[in-house]
Amino acid sequence: MKSKEIRSQFLEFFKSKYHLIVPSAPMVVKNDPTLMFINSGMAPFKEYFLGNGKPKNNRIADTQKCLRVSGKHNDLEEVGMDTYHHTMFEMLGNWSFGDYFKKEAIEWAWELLTEVFKIDKDILYVTIFEGDASEGLEHDSEAYNFWKKFVPEDRILNGNKKDNFWEMGDQGPCGPCSEIHVDIRSAEEKAKIPGRDLVNQDHPQVVEIWNLVFMQFNRKANGSLERLSAQHVDTGMGFERLCMVLQNKQSNYDTDVFTPLIREIETITNSKYGADEKKDIATRVIADHVRAVAFSIADGQLPSNTGAGYVIRRILRRAIRYGFTFLNQKEPFIYKLIETLTAQMGEAFPELLSEKNIITNVVREEEQSFLRTLDQGLVLLENIIENSKSKGNNEISGKKAFELYDTFGFPIDLTALILRERGYSLDEKEFDIELQKQKERSRSATKVETGDWIVLAEDDIEEFVGYDMLQTPVKISRYRKVESKKEGEMYQLVFNLTPFYPEGGGQVGDKGYLKAPDGDLTYILDTKKENNLIIHFTKTLPRNLAETFTAVVDELNRKNTAANHTATHLLQQALRNVLGTHVVQKGSMVQGRNLRFDFSHFAKLTEEELKEVEDFVNARIREGIVLEEKRNIPFQQAVDEGALALFGEKYGDTVRAIKFGNSMELCGGTHVPTTKDIWHFIITSEGAVASGIRRIEAITGDFAKRYFIDRSNSFSAIQKILNNAQDPLKTVEALQEENYDLQKQIKGLLKDKAKDLKGDLKAEIEQINGVGFLAKKIELDAAGMKDLAFEMGGESENLFLVFGAEQDGKALLACYISKKLATEKNLDAGKIIRELGKYIQGGGGGQPFFATAGGKNPGGIDEALEKAKFFV
Ligand code: ATP
Ligand code: MG
């Protein structure tokens, strides 16, 4: 069975059990401070398990793109080494939100595997939670009894808290789980060791394929457990592992999910998969990582230097390094795999197809730049080795290796490998200590302690009323304390309803305050959304939490932000108009001060294009287009009416559409009622973010006014300096011209001076052993010294000149030997200057007839000049 059919059969099966089939959520998480990437099928549904929202259906099934490279789930180091862990993989899952529980979950899993997929019952094992006395948790006999109907008791194994008690995080919903494992070893192997002894023992052919989680508890901040009022089912099955079983393979990489990529890697790198263990690992790493990177870019996460972008960059670099070291790839090559990947997965995940060009360009560029880093690192490593050699040391310090790794991004295993090849060793202990120290530093900097929610009033939905109101009476429904090194102690407040816009869709969160009836103010510093709750951040708590407060949004900041948000939409229209419809938004950041807009385009914008874009936006502003807003319209309707939806954005069933003139966009942000309110739009910068992606920054409204005023002020200041010139531009141009003429004159004068000097110096030449010798300190720069030496040399055939000069606190030396003299007497200016360079604490070199040296000790010039005579 082809992988495509396996995927669709899974979904069909659960559809027949009345599950709603939904598409995969984007893998890159936006606007959730607690998670960077979706790492399991349940993550997009967190809000339902926490009770902060209601799902469309209480039974759902899907295949979800997951990435396990950071945080609680990090499989990165396993990937490639083994044959069944990936960074990015698909997790097939079925969910019950307060609907069915253990019985159905177990029955259906068994039915699907053994009756639909026809997996041999004799290769399956299941595990159940054995209980944990320290937490007062019992053996999951309920699950045991359901399994017993299908599975012989000696194939039902007990598992401990680590394997069989699932937790979302340090806090939140959790419960016992039951895993299904397969034993796909040969009969011979099975006869030697029974499969039950290998379950959960990291055996590559006895692996977990499906985990059924029964959520029945909530873990509180103090570690204690409480029962959930509604019980849920969350299951996750590794799609690639399922394909391995159903296609009778021994490795995920031998299934049709991976073979096209592997064949392509073989072709590009001219190697054979399966012939050499090290090369095989490298091939697997590359086949795996290219998927993770491509899917992330398609979801809008480009490689970068911080946060999620940095994680993606590191994954790609890991692949590049394996290719570099084990497959001898010294030029970019991973980008070539995007073609194969999109051809194979594009149908199931259309975002790959539409973003193919950008993915290819970004990967190629990243490869190029990291290969340069590797080259540079190799040179630095060479220096370190030379240095140790000169000290007779065979062990390279871990500190030095850490520096290479930390500052230059040079991979430590590559360092170790090269050292080994060269007969050196590495002080790995010292390296590990440095690495540990750095980890501690970043951990303590980002650690956040979150307290339990204190619920003041049960309230299911915290309505956002901020499109229509900037002030409204509110009650606090719950709050909690959070503490981090960065922010110190903070409180997070949730209201029954709120006018505060939570950060999202590129727009920053609102600021403002809560006013108590007695006039006491509590400032709201930021607003964010977490698991569908709108959270208001404060430094302190109001005195009486039970009161009714007036929530007031900072109006000026909101107005400026709204102006920038609407301007962002107009900017997108302008770009598509001026540059073409290939322009697609790749990111944006809208705040009161300014706006930033990233978009796909292949070249730098010309002055004219920028002007045209500005003019277009300003013309729309002058027109005073009135905002048309459609709230809560079905997603499909909006798209049919021409609204632009973005890949990587998670949209609900109903959306809000924003229309200015004839362009419509899906947007939850806040806008001005008419474009007139933007006042004016000015582009402040344009540049590249990555290959094929440009960034424009711009200002509007009050900030544009400020910009004009500042410019006008500096113009006046310039005018004043120029003695109130009528036309300062003309005056400055005249000054520039004058300056140019003066420089020319100075150059001429210096030349004359050198000529005079030449006359004086000629008189000072001494005859030693038939050689005209002169060593002298002069006041010229390096170029002047050279000119002088060659001019004097042109007039005589046996000159030996050494000049010294001091410039900007540094010492310069030059040595000139007539060519004839150099050959006849076997003199070498290069060698001589290196010797003399020692007196000025520097080095240099050149040719036998002319060489120069620079050094940091001008005090040594005289001595160098004295010693010069010795060479004659
Ligand atoms: P393992 O112990 O094999 O790492 P897990 O306990 O981490 O698995 P879960 O978190 O229960 O796995 O995830 C559910 C299912 O997802 C697993 O049964 C497995 O089939 C699949 N899975 C988990 N991690 C990976 C991975 N890194 N690559 C591919 N599939 C995975
Ligand atoms: Mg795991």
Image (spheres, helix red, strand yellow):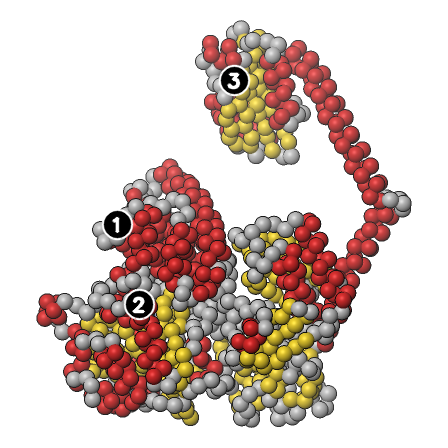
Judge the density around disc 1: few (<14), some (14-19), many (≥20) Cα neighbours within 10 Å. Answer: some
Tally the numbered discs. 3
Residue shown at 21% from the left, 67% from the top? 248
- Label 2 crowd (10 A; few <14 / some 14-19 / many >=20): some
Asked if residue 90 shows in the view, the reply is yes
Type of amino acid under label 2: Ser
Are the two marked residues, 2 and 1, in contact with CB atoms closer than 8 angstroms? no
**Residue at coordinates 61% horizontally, 65% vertically from top-left?**
589
The residue pinned by badge 3 equals 849
| Residue ID for mark 2 | 3
CA distance separating discs 1 and 3? 56 Å
Residue on which disc 1 sits:
272
Three-letter code for the amino acid on which mark 1 is drawn: Lys
Q: Nearer the viewer, mark 2 or mark 1?
A: 2
* Residue 292 horizontal/vertical position (percent): 40, 62
Q: CA distance from mark 3 to mark 2?
A: 73 Å
Earlier-in-chain disc, 2 versus 1:
2
